[in-house]
Amino acid sequence: MLRIAIGTAIDAPGPLGNIITRIHTGRVESGSKLSFHPRSWVTKLKTIKLNGKQVAKVTAGEMVELVVEGPLAEMVKWGSVITSSCEGVDVPDPVKEALSFTVELLVLDVSFTQKAQQYLCTVHEADFTVAVSFISCSMNRKTGK
């Protein structure tokens, strides 16, 4: 299943827009339809550029520039997720909003926000504020306790 978290979206003059991002899972080919979430906007992928050269397809792990049809500034924001889209076919693993989840984190540095019990986390290419309801266990990497 294709998953792409949007890094940078550039609205170019005209009907096309550029997205610079890393393919997290799956693969994508030129001409395929992409679905942008959370807005559920579907558009066509015109071209893919890898290291400045146009390619037909890319796989997970590649840092690419995607050229898509449509008004990016209005429909896409940083942190949005792109998945593959097939008209008339249910996607087996659609993107959903997570209201809560359990996670194991390795914290290298902590930046506190203005609100109590909220931390700024950097995951892949996205920075977002996380509200921590509880910490089940913690360990100091210097002491090992």
Image (cartoon, rainbow, N blue to C red):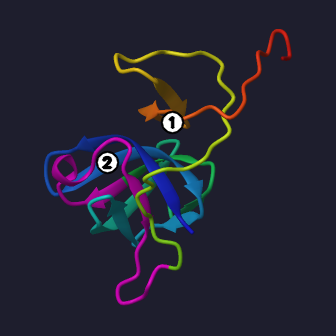
Q: Name the one closer to the observer, 6 or 55.
A: 6
> Residue 9: within the magenta?
no
Residue 120 x %, y %: 46, 25
Residue 58 x %, y %: 57, 59
Mark 2 Cα shell of 10 Å, populated few (<14), some (14-19), many (≥20): many
In the picture shown, does residue 17 fall above or below 121?
below
Query: Which mark, by number, is residue 133?
Result: 1
Q: Residue at x 51, y 28 (%)?
A: 121
Nearer the observer: mark 2 or 1; the answer is 1
Screen quadrant of the C terminus: top right
Q: Residue at x 48, y 50 (%)?
A: 100
Give the extent of the magenta segment.
Answer: 67-91
Q: Name the one closer to the observer, 98 or 24.
A: 98
> Residue 74: within the magenta?
yes
* Picture quadrant of residue 86: bottom left
Q: Residue at x 86, y 16 (%)?
A: 144
What's the amino acid at mark 1? Ser
Mark 2 — residue?
18
Q: Residue at x 45, y 15 (%)?
A: 112
What's the amino acid at mark 2? Asn
Q: Earlier in the sequence, mark 2 or mark 1?
A: 2
Query: Which mark, by number, is residue 124?
Result: none
Residue 120 in view (yes/no): yes
In the picture shown, does residue 12 fall above or below 42?
above
* Picture quadrant of residue 77: top left
